[in-house]
Amino acid sequence: MAGVVSVETPARKDDLILVLNSGSSSLKFGIYGHGAGDEVPLLTGSAEGVGRSNGTLHIRSSGGELLVRQENILESQSDALTALAAVIRQHVHSTPAAVGHRVVHGGPQLCAHQLITPRVLDELRLATHFAPLHIPQALSLVASAQSIFPSAAHFACFDDAFHQTIPAVASSRSCITSAPSFPNEPSSRISVTEQASALFAIEYRSTPPWASLPPAGS
């Protein structure tokens, strides 16, 4: 781990959002705060080659300083999350108010981004066959994150929920030669940040703390 690096923290530490993008053998993450007009990253990083002997873990500050660099490690996504939590405590001096979890598929019953409840977890377990390489990892990571950040609100942001809102032409044509740009495409950490922050605002506040974002599916 590198030496102590100062991380510029927003004034409202109670609105920090942690975003977890879980893959089958990787974990990308970031913690975001309220900037001048949009969310700004405070810490970002990734764990690659999870479960392999050549795995890596890198965590950087908003200024690009390398805070953690571990090479040739055999670790789990939960191990990477534990390391991230330690860096958050050391450099941000706060804990996230909400955690957004990227989930590949919600199955037939979970069609919108939402607060993670016991019912949601049960539905995800039933939907494992829709994405057998991803959903078990996501469930394990949710459990770890809920244990590490018990006071945070945890939200599931589903890849397939995006397809509930795409234009009819995009859902009905097998090939699009010039695909339109969809600002809510969920592959980036920023999209999950927006969805989690909007859901957090809807769940716990009368108005969003940052940008005014509609609930999913509107």
Image: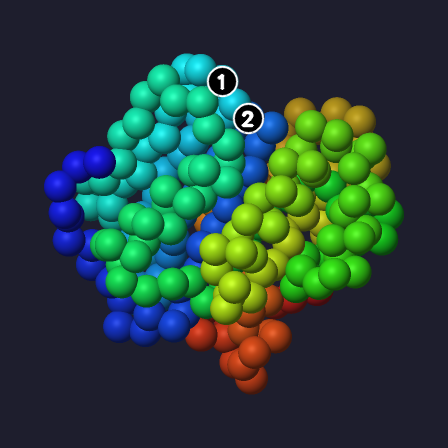
Q: Quadrant of residue 40?
A: bottom left
Q: Is residue 111 visible?
A: no
Task: Name the secondary structure under disc 2.
Answer: loop
Q: Which residue is mark 2?
A: 25
> Who's the residue at 50% across and 68% down the image?
151
Q: Position of residue 2 (x, y in %)?
A: 17, 37
Asked if the residue at tag 2 contacts the one at tag 1, i.e. Cβ–Cβ closer than 8 Å, the answer is yes
Q: Is residue 117 visible?
A: yes
Q: Quadrant of residue 104?
A: top right
Q: For mark 2, does the 10 Å Cα neighbourhood hold few (<14), some (14 to 19), or many (20 or more) residues?
A: some
Give the Cα distance between marks 1 and 2. Answer: 9 Å
N-term mark: 1 or 2: 2
Q: Position of residue 60 (x, y in %)?
A: 27, 40
Q: Nearer the viewer, residue 39 or 102?
A: 102
Q: Position of residue 44 (x, y in %)?
A: 35, 43
Say which of marks 1 and 2 sits in front.
1
Task: Name the secondary structure under disc 1.
Answer: loop
Quarter occupied by the N terminus: top left
Question: In the rendered view, would you say 34 is above or below 19?
Answer: below
> Who's the residue at 50% across and 75% down the image?
208
> Who's the residue at 70% across and 38% down the image?
135
Left or right of 203? Residue 57 is left
Left or right of 3? Residue 146 is right
Q: Looking at the rendered structure, which numbered label has been put on residue 216?
A: none
> Who's the residue at 30% across and 27% down the image?
70
Q: Which residue is mark 1?
A: 52
Q: Nearer the viewer, residue 33 or 72?
A: 72
Q: Nearer the viewer, residue 69 or 39?
A: 69
Q: Position of residue 83 (x, y in %)?
A: 37, 42
